[in-house]
Amino acid sequence: MYGDAVTAAIFGLVGVVVGAIIASAGQYFIDRRGNWNAARAAGLVLYSILDRSEKMVKADPASMANEALAEAWAANREALLFRRGNFPSGLSVAQWLALGDHFAQLELLARDSSTRPQLLKEVAAAKAILEGFTYDDFTLPTLVQNSLRNIWRFSTRGRRRVRITGGGQFR
């Protein structure tokens, strides 16, 4: 008599819990993809600004606009905090900190036109960090491949970090 009602209640509760887990997992992956898109857009914006600045400095050393660099870094640095994980592009903490140092150096060096060689060196170093964002790999195959690789490495050798370089290559 009460058994049927209790069974129905248990199945209802299990259904609600399973539905909540599925919805949460789906929302997590949607948010993660959105954050990756924002990081990639920020990386490409900074890369294009650095590329344009490099061309300007080569043409005329006094033409470097440090305000544009400072504003670009301030506007895009938060989006670049996206942790790469299994996605094809992103920055590690060390890369993000190094990029911040390069932009700080660029801001200082841009005030003095006599520092052209050092300025070009800083621009090239910052562009090298952001270069991974310029590759147009398909995200889903890279994501699946990296996930499977991480699962295999975790199950066979314990937890190890995988470094993903530009172009979907692994180290």
Image: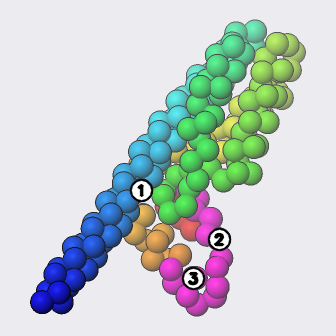
Amino acid type indicated by mark 1:
Tyr
Q: Nearer the viewer, residue 13 or 141?
A: 13
Q: Can residue 78 be seen in this view?
A: yes
Alpha carbon of mark 3 to alpha carbon of mark 2: how far? Answer: 9 Å
Amino acid type indicated by mark 2:
Arg
Alpha carbon of mark 3 to alpha carbon of mark 1: how far? Answer: 24 Å
Judge whether 170 appears above or below 53 on screen: below
Mark 3 — residue? 153
Left or right of residue 97: residue 44: left
Q: Where is residue 21 in the image (x, y as percent from the top left)?
A: 35, 67
Q: Earlier in the sequence, mark 3 or mark 1?
A: 1
Q: Earlier in the sequence, mark 2 or mark 1?
A: 1
Q: Which of marks 3 and 1 is in front?
A: 1
Amino acid type indicated by mark 3:
Arg
Q: Quadrant of residue 19?
A: bottom left
Label 2: which secondary element: loop
The numbered dot on residue 28 is: 1
Q: Residue furthest front?
A: 1
Q: Where is residue 82 in the image (x, y as percent from the top left)?
A: 56, 48
Mark 2 — residue? 161
Q: Nearer the viewer, residue 52 or 138?
A: 138
Judge whether 155 appears above or below 112 on screen: below
The quarter in which the C terminus is drawn is bottom right
Q: How many marks?
A: 3
The residue that appears at 48% across and 58% down in the rendered structure is 87
Judge whether 8 appears above or below 28 on screen: below
Label 1: which secondary element: helix
Alpha carbon of mark 2 to alpha carbon of mark 1: how far? Answer: 22 Å
Q: Does the magenta stretch include residue 162?
A: yes
